[in-house]
Image (cartoon, rainbow, N blue to C red):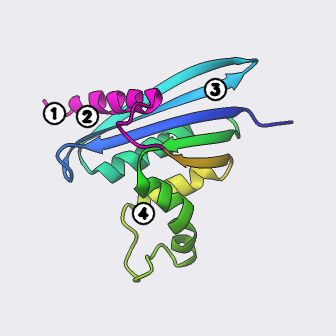
Amino acid sequence: MTKPHVTIYTDGGAKPNPDGPGGWAALLLYEANERTAEKAISGGAPSTTNNRMELTAACEALEALKEPCAVTFYTDSQYVRNGISSWLHNWVKNGWRTANKKPVLNQDLWQRLHTATQRHEIEWKWVRGHAGNRYNERVDRLATQARQQYER
């Protein structure tokens, strides 16, 4: 049986970065029976960083999937894309240490993301932020709204 296909867009940010209020968002687009269903999720934190919010969005999106899926995952974060595609394997192999033997930053979220990826087949794609992609623009707005909840 083939796995259901889901397209995911995520975004996150903090303002000011670092240590300002932050927000994250994800849009999950489920494709079934020639129709697409959408689910948007978001949240935030009172004091965080852009990278933590980008990683949280990725974790929350994959953890929201109720069954193993084939996923096309879009992020505008080079940090997330490079981390998952290029750096993660060596971090795990080296006991969560970087090439220069320092502890991996945001290790808790990288471990969470690594776990969340295990049951899915994921194709990671980078999309330029603020470049007119309607789904990327939508998650940017949702993440900004989530961040603004903590600005009061």
Under mark 2, the amino acid is Arg
On screen, residue 152 versus residue 40, left or right, reads left
Under mark 3, the amino acid is Tyr
The residues colored magenta run 127-152
- Name the residue carrying label 3: 30
Instruction: Measure how far apart labels 3 and 1 are at the Cα level.
Output: 33 Å
Above or below, comparing residue 130 to residue 124 in the picture:
above
CB-based contact (under 8 Å), mark 4 and mark 1: no
Under mark 4, the amino acid is Gln
- Name the residue carrying label 2: 147
CB-based contact (under 8 Å), mark 3 and mark 1: no
Q: Residue at x 35, y 41 (%)?
A: 12
Q: Position of residue 134 (x, y in %)?
A: 44, 26
Q: Residue lying farthest front?
A: 131
- Name the residue carrying label 4: 107
Above or below, comparing residue 78 to residue 27 in the picture:
below
For residue 75, say whether it is visible: yes
- Name the residue carrying label 1: 151
Instruction: Measure how far apart labels 2 and 4 are at the Cα level.
Output: 22 Å
Instruction: Measure how far apart labels 2 and 1 are at the Cα level.
Output: 7 Å
Residue 93 sits inside the magenta stretch: no
**Lower position in the chain sequence, tag 3 or tag 1:** 3
